[in-house]
């Protein structure tokens, strides 16, 4: 491998200092034949201390995000049938995007909780739980707000992937015969949701709260966001399976529509769980 020759081991601690060029993998002791161990895959250059690894990672992340946003279905196709090393792995990508979204939404003082409609039974429950905790409703809701993001991140973000994977398993049952395809598809779709739909929704909620845009405009734009999701799924089906447009559209919209109630139920479960532990 061309990379191997250029790397003189720097003095990272006593092990590296003691051996000029490692002959065996320090992880599994397999004799080395290049920079990467062919048995376990460990890099002989510690990633976090090599600038080159960072540059590689940033390039891979940029390539991954471009494909995710502008080439629906491409990452799923590459992950299943093509080049995996060039892109950030689906689950890593998704969890990192969820984490970044909640970090930014915290900075932007946006609370997912604030989007929840205060239906009557929910209002009753909030009052009851606040009384049980001996807190004012405002104080209790503040507590709910802080915990909701943890519950959401841990449960809902993972559960919605399972929901969409189940729908995709059904819709593509003649194309994919195990869970690898549907789960990859769902992870990439939800990654797109957290890059485009969730930030878009966040901006809309803020703008309409500040009365920069009217409620009617806000609703129209949120319908547009949903349409973008439908178009995204349709294009992904086209790229993955080459279905004719009407079929691709039916499948794309079908996945979105079937996934919606699943997500809504999961959302309510997350809200109830939060109210219970807060
Ligand atoms: Zn090894």
Image (tube, rainbow, N blue to C red):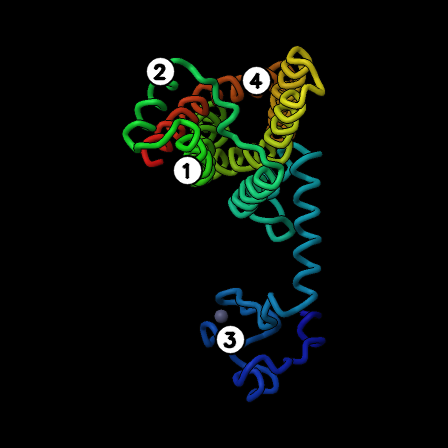
- Note whether 94 is above or below 182 in the view shown: below
User: In terms of sequence position, does the residue under pointer 3 or pointer 2 come before the other?
Assistant: 3
Q: CA distance from mark 1 to mark 2?
A: 21 Å
Label 4 environment density (alpha carbons within 10 Å; few <14, some 14–19, many ≥20): many
- Mark seen at residue 253: 4
- The reply to whether residue 231 is in sight is no
Q: Quadrant of the C terminus?
A: top left
In this view, the mark in front (1 or 3): 1
| Residue 150 position by quadrant | top left
Residue that label 2 marks: 121
Nearer to me, 53 or 147: 147
| Mark 3: C-beta under 8 Å from nearest atom of ligand 1 | yes
Q: Nearer the viewer, mark 2 or mark 4?
A: 2
- The residue drawn where x is 70% and y is 46% is 63
Residue contact at pointers 4 and 1, CB within 8 angstroms: no
Say what secondary structure mark 4 lies in: helix
**Marks 3 and 4: which is nearer the front?**
4
First in sequence: mark 1 or mark 3? 3
Report the front residue among 268 and 254.
Answer: 268
Residue identifier under label 1: 151
Q: CA distance from mark 3 to mark 4?
A: 50 Å
Q: Tell me if the residue at label 2 has its CB under 8 Å from ligand 1.
A: no
Q: Is residue 75 above or below residue 30?
A: above
Chain-order first, disc 4 or disc 1: 1
Sequence-first tag of 1 and 2: 2
């Amino acid at each position: 491998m061309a990379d191997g020759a250029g790397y003189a081991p720097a003095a990272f601690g006593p092990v590296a200092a003691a051996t000029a060029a490692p002959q065996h993998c320090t992880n599994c002791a397999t004799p080395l034949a290049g920079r990467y161990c062919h048995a376990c895959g460990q890099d002989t250059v510690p990633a976090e201390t090599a600038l080159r690894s960072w540059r590689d990672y940033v390039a891979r992340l940029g390539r991954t995000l471009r494909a995710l946003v502008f080439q629906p279905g491409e990452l799923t196709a590459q992950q299943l049938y093509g080049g995996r090393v060039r892109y950030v792995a689906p689950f890593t990508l998704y969890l990192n995007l969820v984490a970044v979204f909640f970090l930014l939404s915290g900075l932007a003082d946006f609370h997912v909780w604030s989007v929840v409609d205060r239906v009557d039974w929910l209002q009753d429950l909030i009052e009851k739980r606040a009384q049980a905790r001996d807190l004012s409703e405002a104080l209790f809701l503040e507590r709910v707000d802080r915990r909701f993001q943890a519950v959401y991140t841990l449960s809902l973000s993972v559960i919605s992937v399972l929901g969409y994977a189940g729908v995709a398993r059904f819709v593509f049952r003649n194309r994919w015969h195990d869970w690898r395809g549907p789960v990859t598809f769902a992870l990439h779709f939800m990654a797109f949701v957290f890059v485009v739909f969730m930030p878009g929704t966040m901006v809309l909620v803020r703008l309409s709260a500040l009365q920069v845009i009217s409620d009617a405009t806000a609703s129209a734009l949120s319908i547009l966001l949903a349409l973008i999701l439908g178009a995204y799924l349709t294009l992904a089906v086209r790229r993955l399976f080459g279905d004719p447009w009407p079929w691709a559209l039916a499948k794309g919209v079908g996945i979105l529509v079937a996934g919606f109630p699943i997500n809504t139920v999961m959302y309510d479960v997350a809200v109830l769980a939060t109210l219970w532990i807060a």
